[in-house]
Image (cartoon, grey):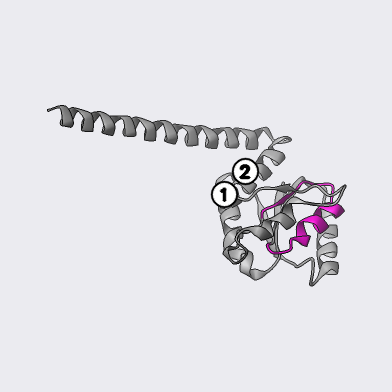
Amino acid sequence: MLVVIIMGSPSDAEFAKKITRALDELGIPWETRVASAHKVPRYVLEMIEAYEADPQPRVYITVAGRSNALSGLVDAQVSAPVIACPPYSDKFAGGDVYSSLRMPSGVAPAVVLEPENAALLAAKMLGLADAGLRAKIQEAQKKQRQRLLEADAAQRADAAQKTAAHQE
């Protein structure tokens, strides 16, 4: 099992680190690569051809902003799932995300804007064939729910203390 994270440029590295940290928490192996569909399309095609020759289950996560041709190019060439996770750009007020949302017919990468959620979706996809990974995901979700319940209990206790102090 492997998650291949392809960044459109080195400037996407900090954003991609959020994905790799989330994958590390679930014990999922990953590789990061840098390749632009606009500037080195042959290189992208050769890279994914090499990955596709390996029979292990994989998910691709593409991290490319502005005009996101990378997600479409990768998705059109592979049978594995592709998740487009474009970094938000203040420069374009998020308008560049649209290039990830509309793809031609037959090209269907999922679009997930939060890097940790892209990692989670990749984990769930890989977990379809891995009961151990499914158990890790379920445990992580259980911990997240527990943290919310604890935060709510603390909030209620704080509110009760303030109410009691106000009534005195």
Question: Which residue in the protein does label 1 denote?
Answer: 22
How far across and how far down the image is residue 113, in percent?
Answer: 63, 51
Any part of residue 31 in sight:
no
Query: Position of 97 compared to 141: left or right?
Result: right
Q: Say which element carries label 2.
A: helix
Instruction: Look at the numbered discs 2 and 1 and tell me whether their residues touch, using CB distance below 8 Å.
Output: yes
**Residue closest to the eye, 134 or 146:** 146
For image coordinates 48% across by 35% down, the residue present is 143
Q: Within the magenta stretch, is there residue 22?
A: no
Q: Residues within 10 Å of mark 2 (few under 14, many from 20)?
A: some
Image x and y of residue 112, in percent = 66, 48
Name the kind of residue labelled 2 in the image.
Answer: Leu
Image coordinates of residue 14 in percent, x first then y, are 57, 63
- Residue closest to the far left: 168
- Verify whether residue 77 appears in magenta: yes
- Point out the residue furthest to the bottom here: 39
Q: Amino acid at mark 1?
A: Ala
Q: Which residue is mark 2?
A: 120
Query: Residue at the spot x=84%, y=47% of the render?
Result: 79
Is residue 3 visible to us here? yes
User: What is the spatial separation of the Cα atoms under label 2 and label 1, in whole angstroms?
Assistant: 7 Å
**Front residue (pair 51, 14):** 14
Q: Earlier in the sequence, mark 2 or mark 1?
A: 1
From the top left corner, tell me how far across and down residue 132 is, in percent. 64, 35
| Magenta-tinted stretch | 65-85
- Helix, strand or loop status at disc 1: helix
